[in-house]
Image: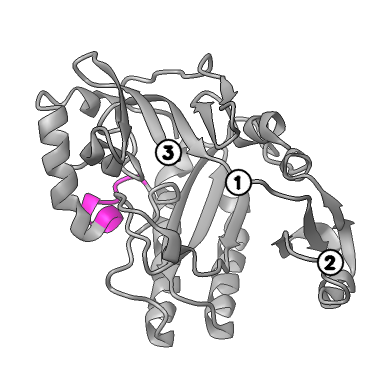
Amino acid sequence: MGTKGVHISLTRFNQVVLSDDESTAEIGFGLTWAEVYQKLDGTGAYNVVLPNGTITTASSDKNPDLFFALKGGLNRFAIVTSAVYKTHPQDKIYIILTIEGISGLVFTPVVLFFYDGEDPGDSFVAFDDILATIDTVLVQSFSDFVGAQAVELLTNPRGTSHTVSVSSLTSTLLDAVKTQVEDLTKKQLLHSGSLVTVDVDPFLQYGQYSTDSAYPHADSPLPISLYVAWDLATADDFWKNATKSAIASIKKVAVQEGVFKDTFTSYPNYAIAGTTAEELYGTNTARLRSIRQSIDPDQVMQLAGGFDLL
């Protein structure tokens, strides 16, 4: 939908610097993850420019409040030029990417599975036996896997996304997701629609490793992400409203199924424009506003556009 406010390109911040002991890596914020994986094949701190022009670092030891805010707080606190990540050795991984063969590919389920444990043996036979249009089951490096994904199928589309988080997945909830995608797909022709996708991620209990951060995720919420793309500006309002309505319908079913918690917030990377700070950060909102006031009292970063902390 374009960037409202001042747009700062970070393209030239493209460094990947692995420490001598290989325990950390500094990642420039002008890189895509595919580029990072290629260089590291084989977050401990942020390097930032504050609104007053000061160049500094934010970590658990230095500027800890800013460090908290930057972990999910987006562009309201500083310009992040790079980050230092903690590294972990990783063997090659076993990947299943299966697109079910359906005539015309009008509604196309995709099964994507990541596994980096011992030899799985026959554990994945049920996935292997799916009649596939595309099947890339093999052991490969993570950079090869990411590089093989078709991430730019459309050229400069208009688009929006929205999300709701759940505690677990039920068949009734998945049916509701499927119904909403089918309904939106039927409306594409009349409203210059070009793509409708939804991602359902059955993560494990990742929250057990969470640290203090702006985005609350200690309960391991599973974000369901809906994305819609279209061609004409005249269809903007239609698709924004349709996306909101679809997520509201999915959320209603999640509540009925008992898999939605009032403490769950919208994952910022998937949330639609206009989502409030309380909807993104819940009880962390007041703390974020206090941090923003201390770091940026003149609200310089407000010029960048994006979600509002006011």
Considering the numbered disc 1 on the image, is that residue within a helix, a strand or a loop? loop
Residue 40 placement (x, y as % from top left)? 67, 33
Residue 251 visible here: yes
Asked whether residue 136 appears in the rendered view, the answer is no
Residue at the spot x=43%, y=86% of the render? 257
What segment carries the magenta color? Answer: 273-281
- Residue type at tag 3: Gly
82 and 74: which one is in front? 82
Check residue 88 in the rendering and tell me which mark sits there, or answer none. Answer: 1
Question: Do residues under tags 3 and 1 come within 8 Å of each other at their CB atoms?
Answer: no
Q: Residue 280 lies in magenta, yes or no?
A: yes
Look at the numbered disc 3 and give the secondary structure of its residue. loop
- Distance between mark 2 and mark 1 Cα atoms: 20 Å
Marks 3 & 2, CB-CB < 8 Å contact:
no
Q: CA distance from mark 3 to mark 1?
A: 12 Å
Amino acid type of the residue tagged 1 in the rendering: His
Q: Which residue is mark 3?
A: 44
Secondary structure of the residue carrying numbered label 2: loop
Alpha carbons under labels 3 and 2: distance apart: 32 Å
Packing grade of label 2 (10 A; few <14, some 14-19, many >=20) is: few
